[in-house]
Amino acid sequence: MQEAAFLARSPTAAGPSEALKISIPQTGAIGFMILFGLFCMAAALMLLYLKYRVVLTGERCKGKITGIAEQRGGYAVGGYAVKKHAYLVKIGGRQYYTAHGCLFMPLGRKKIGKEIWVFRNETYGREVFQCRDVRIEVLSLVFALAATLCFLYR
């Protein structure tokens, strides 16, 4: 925490005056850290909500990966549309796609034809979440730790 220091003179009975240091904390950095901590905590909870609204209310199904679809992420970085590579999963004759697919295309192509367990809920569309995939929880934990550090070191 940054502090502004002021010097004050205090007379003593024994001799010349000594300098005392008085510190006053600055409030601008504190407000920013609290606001940033609240933003990180909201992001962590939103990620968990988006996944567990499907996991807790949906059904667990076994599906077969039939391919990889290239989808737009819905936002742009540096003027270029962000794309994601989602697995296409076939469950009972209907085609679904995973919420987050493969990170590396060569490794993702090796999974084509394999069966995986997924959570699905028809009310939220054709997006399914893979069972035993902890990427969202890890990202949410990183946001929660960032929020905790902002609250501790404000």
Image (cartoon, helix red, strand yellow):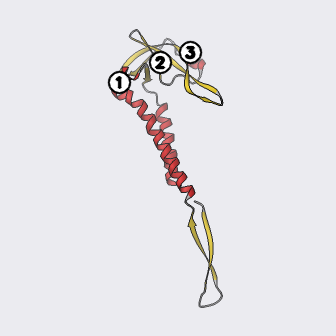
Q: Quadrant of residue 25?
A: bottom right
Name the side, left or right, on which 44 lies relative to 24: left
Residue 97's disc is 2
Amino acid type, label 2: Tyr
Q: Name the residue located 61 percent from the left edge and 25 percent from the top edge.
A: 81
Residue 83's disc is none
Name the side, left or right, on which 137 lies relative to 57: right
Q: Name the residue located 55 percent from the left edge and 25 percent from the top edge.
A: 73
Name the side, left or right, on which 141 lies relative to 59: right
Of the numbered discs 3 and 1, the one sitting upstream in the chain is 1
**Depth-wise, is mark 3 or mark 2 nearer the camera?**
2
**Depth-wise, is mark 3 or mark 1 nearer the camera?**
1
Q: Distance between the residues labelled 3 and 1?
A: 27 Å
Residue placed under numbered mark 1 in the picture: 58
Decide: few, some or many residues near mark 2? Use Cα within 10 Å; few <14, some 14-19, many ≥20. many
| Disc 3 to disc 2: CB gap under 8 Å | no
Q: Is residue 81 above or below residue 91?
A: below
Residue placed under numbered mark 3 in the picture: 109
Give the image location of residue 131, x and y in percent.
Answer: 42, 25
